[in-house]
Image (cartoon, grey):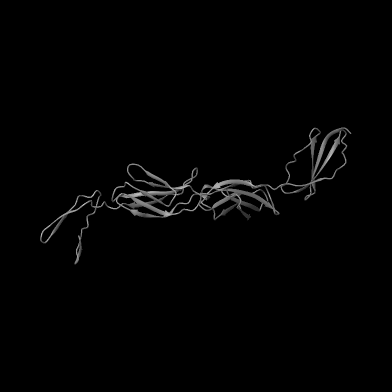
Amino acid sequence: MSLHHYLVSILDVENNKSEEVFVEKLNTSAAIGNLTSFRHYLLHLFSVAERGTLSCSEKPISAVTGIHPPLKVYAKLEDVREDSIVLQWEPPQDSHEVYIQIKAISDIREVRKLFVKDATRFKVDNLIPGMTYDIGMATVMNGNLSELVTIQQTLSLEAPSNIHEGKVTDSSIEILWNRADGNFQHYEITCINCAAAFMVQKVFQEAATFSNLDPATMYTFSIHTEKQGFQDSTPHIKEIQTAPSAIEFMNHSRNSNAVTVNWPLARSRLDGYIISISSNSFLKEE
C-alpha cells in the first residue's frame, strides 16, 4: 500500500461526537486544537493509501484535556496593605472554584493553601508587612487543578507606633517608638526643621537622638520604615520642643533685709524666669 496521508479521528466521549484531522505523510506528529477543557477524548490514528483505503484501527488513545487556568491574576495597588492583599482574577468559562497558594520568599517551605468558590476576588489576611510573596492560582474542576498562574507581590511596610519623646535637654531630643512588625531594613527619622536643611538618621533600633539643637524650639520629626527598592511606609509626624537654656551662672548681693540676684540673658526665647528662695523656715518662688 502506498501511503498518501494520515487521518486522526477524535471522539468526544461525553457528547459522542467525532471529527477528523488530515495529516501529511511526512509528519509524524500533530497538534489538535479547539478541544473542550477537561473533556475525555478517544483518538484513532489511520494510514490512508493513494486510493483512500484506511489501515486497520489500532487501540485508541484515551486522553483527558487539561483545565484552563485563570485568564488573569492581579492585585490593585490600593488593595495591597501592610498585612493583607485582595486578589482578583478572570475565571475561564464554566469555572466555579480556584485554588490559591501563597509562599513567602523568605521561607518557601511554608505554603498557605486556600480554595475559593464562586468568586472573582478574595482577601488574604494575616500576612507579614513588607514581605514579598509568590502567589499561585489554578482552576479547580472535579478535584483536579489546572496549571498555576503565578504573580509576585510585596506588601506595604508597617509604620512605627507610639512615637514619644525620651530624654530632652536644651540642645538635644531623644525620640522613642514601638518596634514595627514586618520585613524591612531600617527606620528613617528626619528632622524637618533642623538647621537650614533636613537632618536624617537611619537606625536599626527603636530610638534616635538629635543634637546641636536650639533651646526652647519646636522641632518636627518624620519617621517611617524603609526597604530598598520598595515603597516606604506611611510617615508618622511628631513635634517635640527642646527645653529652655539653663542659666549659666548667677551673682548676688545683700543687705540687712534683701538679696539682689542677677544673671546673663538666656540664649533662647523665654516667657520669663522663676526664682526660688528657700531656707530652713520657708520656701518662696517668684
- Residue 41, placed above or below residue 52: below
Give the residue furthest to the bottom.
Answer: 281
Q: Is residue 228 left or right of residue 246?
A: right
Number of labels in the image equals 0
Q: Is residue 83 left or right of residue 255?
A: right
Q: Percent position (x, y) of residue 172?
A: 33, 50
Of the pair 40 and 151, the residue shown nearer to us = 151
Q: Is residue 90 visible?
A: no
Give the residue furthest to the right.
Answer: 1
Q: Quadrant of the N terminus?
A: top right
Q: In this view, does 80 lie to the left or right of 277?
A: right
Give the residue furthest to the front.
Answer: 280
- Residue 138, placed above or below residue 3: below
Query: Residue drawn 40% across and 48% down?
Result: 222
Q: Percent position (x, y) of residue 122?
A: 58, 53
Q: Percent position (x, y) of residue 217?
A: 30, 50
Q: Is residue 123 visible?
A: yes
Q: Percent position (x, y) of residue 67?
A: 69, 48
Q: In this view, does 279 lie to the left or right of 127?
A: left
Q: In which quarter of the image is the C terminus?
A: bottom left
Give the residue furthest to the left.
Answer: 256
